[in-house]
Image: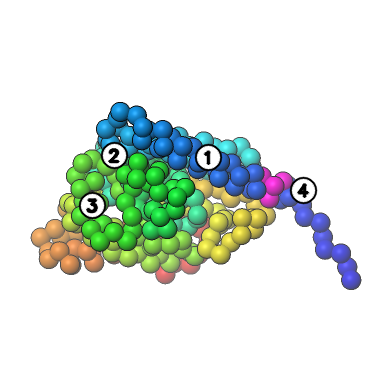
Amino acid sequence: MPLAAPRAPLLSWRVLAAGICYLIFAVAASIPAALALGLKILPLDSTRRQRITRDSIRYLCRFYMNFMQLAGLLRFTVTDRSTAPVAGHVIVANHPTLIDALFVMAYVPDVCCIAKPGLARNIFTRMTLAQAGFLVADADDLMEQACARLHAGENVLIFPEGTRNTSDLELDFRRGAANLAVLADSPVLPVVIHCRPRILQRGDKWYQLPSERPELDIVIEPELVRGDCIDTSAPRTRQYRTLTRYLREYFHTRLAAAPGAQDKMV
């Protein structure tokens, strides 16, 4: 029986580097938790604690993304085309990889994430989420809480697809982001993420890496004002549907024009 061809040295190094990065992520993820515990005993108000916690998360995300690039696991570029201060925006991003939220938190200020319920119950992450003021996806009053955060000037991150997609050009946008933008009367900040070749998709193991080093382009686009996108005099339910469709086409157009886009138009 013939022996399997040996793994290319470069790919072998990248698999080792991926393992190291996962270990570093586990260690780095404990830092905000330790910080949250320390902040709990200091005489600070909740707003100050939230700001410190979110800033620590932001800098750790930046460190982690840059470390992954330095280790040769990926290359990335971040282009900021936003033209106004980013405050009180619904951040809408497509979701090709596991690490998309890390990029958004690293390069957009004051991000309020909507966390999975399991993270809010985990003893290692729940204090961090609470101190950061993140929302929990199964909260009965999620929309009311998110609207309040937007009106306070925070930026709420939503992935309209709800989970990682399988193709840049087959986007299945749900109505949550549009609903929130309409209810809060907030502008939308699109973040378009293009990854080629794809990594860290649903079902992928950490060691399953493409033969080529992935390149990610993250583009923070100018804000979208609802009145420039849809008829704001229409009934609210129609606005939800129309804005959802508008956002899907917006992302579809930009991802189709991205260098290296391979998928067929749908």
Disc number for residue 28: 1
**Spatial distance from mark 2 to mark 4, Cα to Cα?**
44 Å
Instruction: Say which residue appears at 50% left-offset and 55% top-offset.
Output: 97
Quadrant hosting residue 223: top left
Q: For this rendering, which residue is in front, 141 or 265? A: 141
Q: Callout 1: 10 Å neighbours few (<14), some, many (20+)?
A: some
Magenta stretch secondary structure, dominant: helix
- Residue 2, horizontal then vertical, whole percent: 88, 68
Q: Say which residue label 4 marks.
A: 9
Which residue, as the protein is rendered here, is positioned at the far left?
Answer: 233
Query: In the rendered view, would you say 15 is above or below 77?
Result: below
Q: Say which residue label 2 marks.
A: 86
Give the residue type at disc 2: Val
Instruction: Say which residue appears at 42% left-offset and 69% top-offset.
Output: 266
Is residue 16 covered in magenta?
A: yes
Instruction: Say which residue appears at 35% left-offset and 42% top-offset.
Output: 132
Magenta-highlighted residues: 13-17
Q: Is residue 254 left or right of residue 141?
A: right
- Residue 69, horizontal then vertical, whole percent: 58, 40
Give the residue type at disc 1: Ala
